[in-house]
Amino acid sequence: MSKTKKMQLQTKTEIKSFDEKLSHTSKILMLGSCFANNIGERLLDAKFNVCINPFGVVYNPFSIANSIELLIANTKITENDLLQHNGLYYNFCYHTSFSSMDKQYTLNKMNIAKQRGSEFLKNAKNILITFGSAVGYKYKKTDKIVANCHKIPSFEFEKIVLNIDDTVKIMNRSIQNIMTVNNDANFIFTVSPVRHLSDGAHENQLSKSRLLIATDEICRNNSRCQYFPAYEIMMDELRDYRFYAADMLHPSNLAVDYIWQKFANAAICNESLKLIEEIEKISIAKSHRTFNPDSDEHKKFLKTYLEKTKLLQAKYPFVDLAEELKYFDC
């Protein structure tokens, strides 16, 4: 009798190791859909120097390109740039998370984020751009595509679908413009695995297909650009609904962790991967909860990890462990 063949229960996604890898010593700028937030937050937890979506979550390539131009120009948002709806001040280039009922607070929040994003754009070694949707919405009064509709009535917008050629053209122009202010930048492109089903599953697939073809052409024609297959991992390796959040649209935390591990192995340098392991040990210790904080055992635990954290900080002075040092030194 022949030996039983080993079962293969997943379609594995081929992931090439990146040429230019991420390091704790360099700045990283994340732009695009909420998946950029997901990976950016993992990088922050691992103590990388990261700026995540200075305009908030942005979905379509045109609005991402517009965000890049605004960061390059680095002009301040003024009162004249704000609009008001239902008591909230907002700007069509920013996500709703920047909106508020206080005009000055809104301006300050927008300008602080924009200033930090501009500084990162001009100094970042790596810029990660995540396309979420090829669908955009043009505000009829200004004839401009917006990054967010801010719950303005839908009849005030015209739905448009960005074609492949336009997406490639505007992003190639953005890359060239970035290179004029940051000639050291390398780019990582991804297509978000988050499904956009407001117009149906078929429309979502067409949208993702346009983005996938566009990113392929962008990366083939630009030596500084590489592609990470987040969308393919979700669709092929994690196709079961248990890897989705309750809305059945967003990846679950488990799925994001899985994709993050794949990303880290492909995109992060070996020294930083080792450092991540050490940081995780410190983070796990910090999250430990004791029943008796006054016990000698707990005080010994804190002292042990205070010394470990001090040693790690001394070895890697460019990593910010101030919060951990304060926690253990109590």
Image (cartoon, helix red, strand yellow):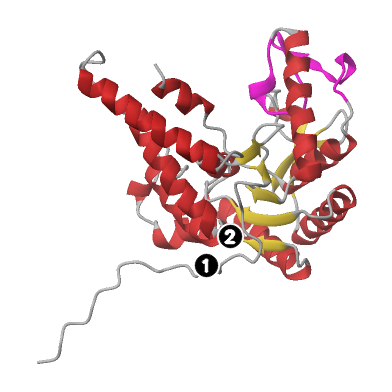
Q: Position of residue 49 (x, y in %)?
A: 63, 39
95 drawn magenta: yes
**Disc 2 crowd, CA 10 A, few/some/many (<14, 14-19, 20+):** many
Residue situated in front as seen by the camera: 13 or 323: 323
Which x, y percent locates residue 81?
Answer: 86, 21
- Tell me the residue at 47%/58% (across/down): 262
* Residues at marks 2 and 1 touching, judged by CB atoms closer than 8 Å: yes
Give me the disc on residue 15: 1
Where the N terminus falls, by quadrant?
bottom left
The numbered mark at residue 228 is: 2
Residue 201: assigned label: none
**Residue at coordinates 82% horizontally, 58% vertically from top-left?**
172
Number of on-image labels: 2
- Is residue 251 shown left or right of residue 319? left
* N-terminal-most mark, 2 or 1: 1
Residue type at mark 2: give it: Phe
Between residue 125 and residue 236, name the one nearer to us.
125
Residue farthest along the left direction in this orientation? 1
Q: Is residue 219 above or below residue 50?
A: below
Q: What quarter of the picture does the C terminus occupy?
A: top left
Horizontal and vertical percent position of residue 261: 45, 54
Residue 183 in view here: yes
> At label 1, which amino acid type do we have?
Ile
**Highlighted magenta segment, given as a residue range:** 76-100
Residue 262, compared with residue 59, is above or below; it is: below
Query: Residue furthest toward the bottom?
Result: 1
